[in-house]
Image (tube, grey):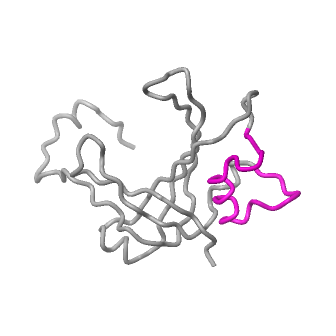
Amino acid sequence: MSVFDPNAFLDMPVEGTNDTVIVPCPVGEYLAVVEKITVRPWTKKDDPSQGGLALDIIWNIEDQSVKEFLDREKVNVKQGIMLDLTESGTLDMGKGRNVSLGRLREAVGLNNPGQAFSFNQLPGQMAKVKVDHRPDKNDPTIIFAEIKAVTKAS
């Protein structure tokens, strides 16, 4: 087994050029599987005293024609959900709160009365996702694909 030598790697000559643009997943509706979830803290840029938690869901698009079009074995698109929290920092389960999370849970069959839910149940779940595009606010030539809606796969 060889040992990685970072200096040899840095000296290694490379032929060709690198891409300078990422072609986003096309706009459309696709079957997708939750690949990964993360929870991250956020704060308002103009008011750092306001913040909370956001759930980031990485969906793996299952459409073979999209994979072929993009020339990728795996096509991942991110969905972000801002979470409503109670004063004590727990998930707010009140009326009209965490609706986007409720829609996600409903789409993957994890929003059933009397059934406990944990975020770690999401990876591996399938749903139909709606992919849309958003331009970068600093450079509108850079386009990001993101999940705008999730519904049941059936």
The outermost residue toward the front is: 96
Q: What residue appears at the point 62 percent right and 61 percent down from the top-left corner?
A: 124
Quadrant occupied by the C terminus: bottom right
Q: Nearer the viewer, residue 33 or 115?
A: 115
Q: What residue appears at the point 40 percent right and 62 percent down from the top-left corner?
A: 132
In the rendered image, residue 96 lying in the magenta stretch gets the answer: yes
- Magenta residues? 91-117
> Residue 45 at what x, y percent from top left?
43, 27
Q: Nearer the viewer, residue 86 or 70?
A: 86
Q: Nearer the viewer, residue 37 or 148?
A: 148
Main SS category, magenta section: loop
Q: Nearer the viewer, residue 6 or 46?
A: 46
Q: What residue appears at the point 52 percent right and 32 percent down from the top-left corner?
A: 42
Q: How many marks?
A: 0
Q: What residue appears at the point 74 percent right and 48 percent down from the top-left corner?
A: 118
Query: Which quarter of the picture shows residue 151?
Result: bottom right
> Residue 153 at what x, y percent from top left?
61, 74
Q: Report whether 19 appears left or right of 62.
A: left
Q: Is residue 151 above or below residue 4?
A: below
> Residue 108 at what x, y percent from top left?
67, 65
> Residue 16 at what x, y percent from top left?
11, 53
In the rendered image, residue 20 lying in the magenta stretch gets the answer: no
Q: Is residue 65 above or below residue 7?
A: below
The outermost residue toward the right is: 114
